[in-house]
Amino acid sequence: MSDGAGNRGGIGLRNTQDLVCGLFFMAVGALGMWVGRDYPMGSPVRLGTGVFPRILCWGMLITGFAILLKGLFTAGESMGKVAWRPVILISVAATAFALAIDPLGLVVAMLVMIIPAGFAGHEFYPKEFTIFTVILVVIGVALFIWGLGMPIKTFPWS
Amino acid sequence: MELSQLASNLALGFGVALTLQNLFWCFMGAVIGTAVGVLPGLGPVATMALLLPVTYYLPPEGALIMLAGIYYGAQYGGSTTAILVNLPGESSSVVTCLDGYQMARQGRAGPALAIAAIGSFFAGTVATLLIAVAAPPLTALAQSFGPADYCSLMVFGLVTAIVMASGSVIKAVGMIFFGLLLGIVGTDVNTGNLRYDFGVGILFDGINFVPIAMGVFGINEIMANLTNEERRDVLSSRIAGLMPTWADIKESSGAILRGTALGSLLGILPGGGALLASFAAYSLEKKVSKTPEKFGTGIIQGVAGPESANNAAAQTSFIPMLTLGIPSNAVMAMMVGGMMIHGIIPGPQVMTDKPGLFWGMIASMWVGNAMLIIFNLPMVGVWVKMLTVPYRLLSVAILFFCCIGVYSVNNSAEEVLLITGFGLLGYFLIKMGCEPAPMLLGFILGPMMETYLRRAMLLSRGDPYVFLQRPLSLGFLIAAAILLVIIVLPNVRKVREQAFVEE
């Protein structure tokens, strides 16, 4: 983080963890309020759909605001670097599995999941990875299709 | 509580727990638990989330016995890694590293492992008995609760969870609100109105427990663990002389007793559990020791105390869940999830309606502990071998089991997409310094709390003072308020911070 503008000695703006967290909680609270603006409140005897969500959204807004204030006026930790490589590759892997499993079957879904996930670590050894992939696919098919009899296709054409 | 009744309850329980089938599930749970306990970077919460879909295929007794086994099994396994590799296999074994690894370096890995196991077994036995003794009166008490009392009890539980959470207090509050909010997504059961569905079909019935738990704990952990370089120096020397000497046992017996007592107590409190218990036990041992300066150099009490405490707490944390139906930590939230998969609503009625399940599960905990002490020590070699599987491969396998596991619950590919979303959410929440455990508690309690709130208001004809007029409800609210005030006081905050940063 660069030294922030303003004259708080830069302390406040280094506390990005609290700043972002406060803003995030407030955003969730505000979104909840806005989406739920038409939820009926009912009567005290018969509380409507909107009562509990409103209580919770106010809770989010207030705690979010408090965290934001804390972030502005006290020292704290910065957000730290996001490890984009594993975050993106693991997300891609799980998403690919989700999209492939119904139309293309288990084997293809496993492959499109295993390959990006395999590159998510710090090291990659082609031979080890190939053997591992074959073993995992065999285990997957044996356990879930032959063993548990899950109603999934094995191959795209089966 | 009459002794004969206790005996007949336990007899009923052992009758269930000792059937061949349930022995098998208990064994499976304990072994899987030990394995994930040994492996750093895969915790009991994620594993239970992973196996929830599988338990769908089991009878309810077998499912819950296995899930319980994973939790206390992990406490045994975690100590193995802590002692041999100086890595906490489980977060609750962090303090075991301090003296356990030093003992191993002095060639005393055997006694350290043995004392950890013996302490855990003793603590497990006491805790099992404690559950058996405490459950019936607490259940009877719970049956006199009205909706207002339940609502206030949940407030109290959530406030305690905030106090016990290891990070920032105010962030834990926010996470609970967030969890409660996520919990009420979907159709409002009381009015049939849709809430926060964003027009997305899979949200009409609410967010399922499995994808949220697996995303926030499974996927998120994979992402976080892959960030760190791997470094595992497994102690290569052979473990000689497994058996502790008589002197070892004598030295650690006090620590085991104190750890068991402290752990049992901390486990019952909402938000407490194995992690807090082991930290507290280590500080306690240091305080009562005549040679506190020797801690950290391989002193056996430093292993015996925390290891007994974490196992005791792991088990007594079942008490509020079993008797009141209120989960006190993320693992118990998983257990509630496991019960709901089988259509069992957790609460005081479980003991009266399904005594076999209730007592069977309690008895199985002792059976599981006995199995663990028998097979764990001889199998240390196998566990150590397992540590040589590199995480870059393990992570892929875990990811696969997460995906297929979520898919198998409803054969729904959309729910697999949800775990990606919740994994990312969990990752960024941790980046913001927020612990996900309180969120999961809120998620489970959200719908329950709303229902009780509505019922209480209906019964009181719209008078909100009902929460202050019922003595039980008032008591819970006062206790919650006191806790909140205490936590804000600066010097208490300091102690709390210290308890978690015990070096």
Image: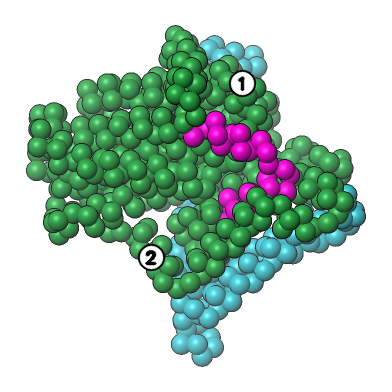
Chain colours: A cyan, B green
> As shown in the figure, which amino acid type bears the numbered disc 1?
Lys
Looking at the image, residue B34 lies above or below residue A67:
above
User: Residue B203 at x, y = what percent?
Assistant: 75, 41
The residue type indicated by label 2 comes to Val
Q: Is A38 left, or right, of B165 in this rendering?
A: right
Give the residue at x 47% y 43%.
B268
Residue at (75% x, 60% y) in the render: A55
Q: Point out the stretch of residues depicted in magenta.
A: B134-159
Question: Residue at 35% of width from left, 26% of height from top?
Answer: B369
- According to the picture, the residue beneath numbered tag 2 turns out to be B495
Which comes sooner in the sequence, label 2 or label 1?
A: 1
Q: Is residue B146 magenta?
A: yes
- Choose between B464 and A33: the one closer to the eye: B464
Q: Is B223 or B265 nearer to us in this picture?
A: B265
Where is residue B218 shown, x and y percent of the image? Answer: 50, 40
Whether B356 is drawn above or below B152: the answer is: above
Q: Quadrant of residue B141?
A: top right
Callout 1: chain: B
